[in-house]
Image: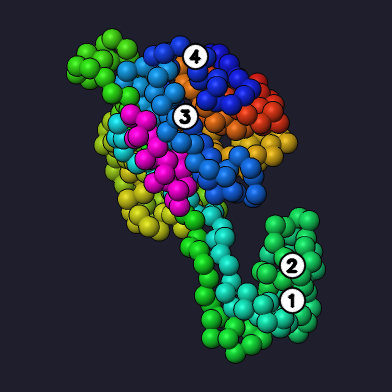
Amino acid sequence: MSALLHHGDCLEVMRGMDADSIDSIVTDPPYGLSFMGKGWDRGVPGAEYWSEALRIAKPGAHLVAFGGTRTYHRLACAIEDAGWEVRDCFVWAYGQGFPKSHDVSKAIDKAAGAERMIIAPDPHAARRNRATPQFGGPAMNTYDPGYDGPLGRMAITAPATDDARRWSGWGTALKPAWEPAVIARKRFRGTVAENVLRHGTGAINVDGCRVSGPMTGSWGGKQLSSIGFGGTVPSSYQTKAHDAGRWPANLAHDGSPDVLDLFPRDAARFFYSAKASKADRGACNTHPTVKPSELMAYVCRLVTPPGGLILDPFMGSGSTGIGALREGFRFAGIELDASYLEIARARLGAA
């Protein structure tokens, strides 16, 4: 299988591609959240990007684009405004999200210039292998190079002012636990059957993405049963699958107890894909939002005809490309950042 990587603005690169030449588009574009202060994440790609993607896609080709829960509506509207037919919303649920919440009580004390006293240790101190601020001492305002927050932020502190005590326990954000993806399709003339025979596109690979029956495995020392494609769930969640496997759902999960508890005894209905591990990310991968290659492989297999050409116009570190190559597809990726392009090149070479 082949991979062709382009360096540049995807809008300009796509303008140089032939019309009706792409079998599917699978991508994880910017969410418009200014994540970690990254300049490329300041906005959601507008309709002009998806219009150009529509031009180069074959009639009936599918588009899968991940988005953020706060800005998904802008992504979906831009894709629809460009002329795509929105077919579904795919959800990837996970248990490892970290809440980016602002502690109102601490903010009140800080504004008042009041020092808070530490009453319990930083629960992450042992994991980070460093000392904890002394009990009874003020919360520190310096920064740990190995951690992305103030040293005293994770320690439990007591409110110092009456206003802070009144608003203790109040924050500004929920714990992230899922990401949505738009599933859209380029409109075509005639029936699905006619379009599939003419272009090879317009349908999804149901049987190729069914969730298979149980197999043995382990998670945290406990006996597990697999839910297909490498996924595992506790044995208490085992269910008898249909002989052909369960119909693929519009939800995937990471197999964590947090997620499995939401679907008691029925988690096997959904595709499993853990968050990207260090091994999956690859050495020296500095990209902050790496999707697991197993998840991207599953999505590629779902919407791409055999041997088809997949485009990722916002390639990042190349997870879509890895998934595409693993599934036997051809791949074309576009990346504006030269450093990410080289990371993708190395990861795809290893794959």
- Looking at the rendered image, the disc whose residue lies closer to the viewer, 3 or 2, is 3
Task: Depth check: give the residue in front, 106 or 294.
Answer: 106
Please, which residue is most extreme toward the front here?
48
Q: Label 4: few (<14), some or many (≥20) within 10 Å?
A: some
Query: How far, Cα to Cα, is label 1 from label 3?
Result: 47 Å
**Mark 3, secondary structure of its residue:** helix
Nearer to us: label 1 or label 3: 3
Magenta range is 66-84
Q: Which residue is mark 4?
A: 17
Residue at 79% x, 66% y is: 142
Which of disc 3 and disc 1 is earlier in sequence?
3
For marks 2 and 4, give the one nearer the viewer: 4
Identify the amino acid type marked 1.
Ala
Alpha-carbon distance for marks 3 and 2? 42 Å
Where is mark 2, residue-wise? 151
Residue at 54% from the left image edge and 54% from the top image edge: 96
- The residue that disc 1 covers is 139
Q: Earlier in the sequence, mark 1 or mark 2?
A: 1
Residue extending furthest toward the left:
191
Q: CA distance from mark 4 to mark 3?
A: 13 Å
- Its colouring scheme is rainbow
Q: CA distance from mark 1 to mark 2?
A: 8 Å
Alpha carbon separation for disc pair 2 and 4:
50 Å
Instruction: Give the alpha-carbon distance from disc 1 to disc 4, as whole Å.
Output: 56 Å
Quick one: quadrant of the C terminus? Answer: top right
